[in-house]
Image: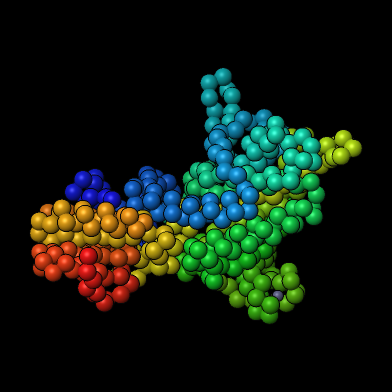
Amino acid sequence: MLQLSKFPFKTLKTVPGWSDNKWTWLLLQAGYIRQELAWAYNYLHYGVKTLEKIKQIVREELNSIWAIEILMSSFSPKESWLKTWRWDSVDVLFKVEWSGNKQYALNPTHEEVVTPLMQEFIQSYKDLDNCQVYQFQTKFRNETRAKSGVLRGREFIMKDLYSFHKNQEELDIYFEKAHGAYNRIFDRLWIWKDTLYTFASGWVFSKYSYEFQTILEIGEDNVYVCEKCWQAHNNEIVEETFKCVECWSNEYKIIKTSETWNIFKLSTKFSNAFGLKYADEKWIQNEIVMWCYGIGISRIMWVIAEKFADEKWLVWPENIAPFSHYLIIIWDNKQKALEFAKKLENEWKEVIIDDRDIWFWQKASDADLLGIPYRIVISDKTIEKWWYEIKARNSDEVKILTF
Ligand SMILES: [Zn+2]
């Protein structure tokens, strides 16, 4: 449990004036984040807890399709990027130099790390029955169009999964499993029905890639949706004239979205660049096909904040909120509140105790600003009758329950 009398961070009374969008200023005002640079953020305690909730949902679903969690370095040597011909072709690559003129990349994606890393463990066909690894990692893009917020930032948190297969057929089977897991993830994050499966350009990987674009009024992308078959297309593949890649219709409408995940067909590009091959039953060396599946973790926090906020403040779904209950103490009932919070924690609830020496309305307004799903009030009057008051964040109804 968290006791606010012992907590260093505070909410702001007024909206901070230094951001250009509502979701960012709500997260700033409520004390989830602080801005370090226009496109880089510090996550305070509530922000970290929320990110962890999102990560845990992703982790559970990826573990269920036999993907194994690892954590790779943010750096990689220039030589690896020269092998894949991407040192000069990736225009967003952050390059850093250390003494002795040695150059490194601050990774925007990890193919140049994961491929040689897995090479040590992949020798024969037996090693490829279940070879999928993923990580949660901070990514860097030297983005010329960097915007404030995390929509087009130079630093952001991604989940990236890499899968290694003997052939296209086995990859297709795993792709369907991953697609199912991703649908479950987006369902549990409450954004599945607002998310469009979108054709996009392959960036530096292939002709097409696939993105999941979540409908969002202030999103950074325009998605072109075919009026006839509802297939969505990213603006990168709609040049001057629109032609649906599925039904060839040229009628479309534009919807504002934010990209929340993508898939790249890496094929044999990276495995061949590093000479990663496997031996089959006859000890003949064969090519390995790879895919990469990404989810923008920090971006999803922003998207959910925006989607669920009411006209005033934050409202989090219960499984994503940093804490489930905000317990307000009136007068000197701290001992009772601590006992009650312990009881709630035994029921797997996560509790903030507001035991600060301030007015009730200040505590109630912070509970609403933070978007905590339930607010509980304990006072002399309620304790006397073994009662407490509980109110859901998205309702005005106050219920009286017994301890
Ligand atoms: Zn169409």
Compared with residue 45, is residue 194 higher up or lower down, i.e. above or below?
below
**Quadrant that contains the C terminus:** bottom left
Q: Which residue is drawn at 67% across and 63% down?
A: 199
Residue 335 coordinates in the image, percent (x, y): 15, 53
Residue 261 coordinates in the image, percent (x, y): 58, 57
Q: Which residue is drawn at 63% across and 49% down?
A: 66
Q: Residue at x 60, y 59 (%)?
A: 181
Instruction: Name the residue nearer the viewer: 39 or 122.
Output: 122
Instruction: Tell whether 174 sits left or right of 185.
Output: right
Instruction: Tell whether 232 sits left or right of 355.
Output: right
* Rendered image coloring scheme: rainbow
Q: In which quarter of the image is residue 106?
A: top right
Residue 152 coordinates in the image, percent (x, y): 50, 53
Residue 313 coordinates in the image, percent (x, y): 31, 66
Instruction: Name the residue nearer the viewer: 213 or 242.
Output: 213
Q: Which residue is drawn at 52% across and 45% down?
A: 136
Compared with residue 129, is residue 317 higher up or lower down, i.e. above or below?
below
Q: Quadrant of ligand 1?
A: bottom right
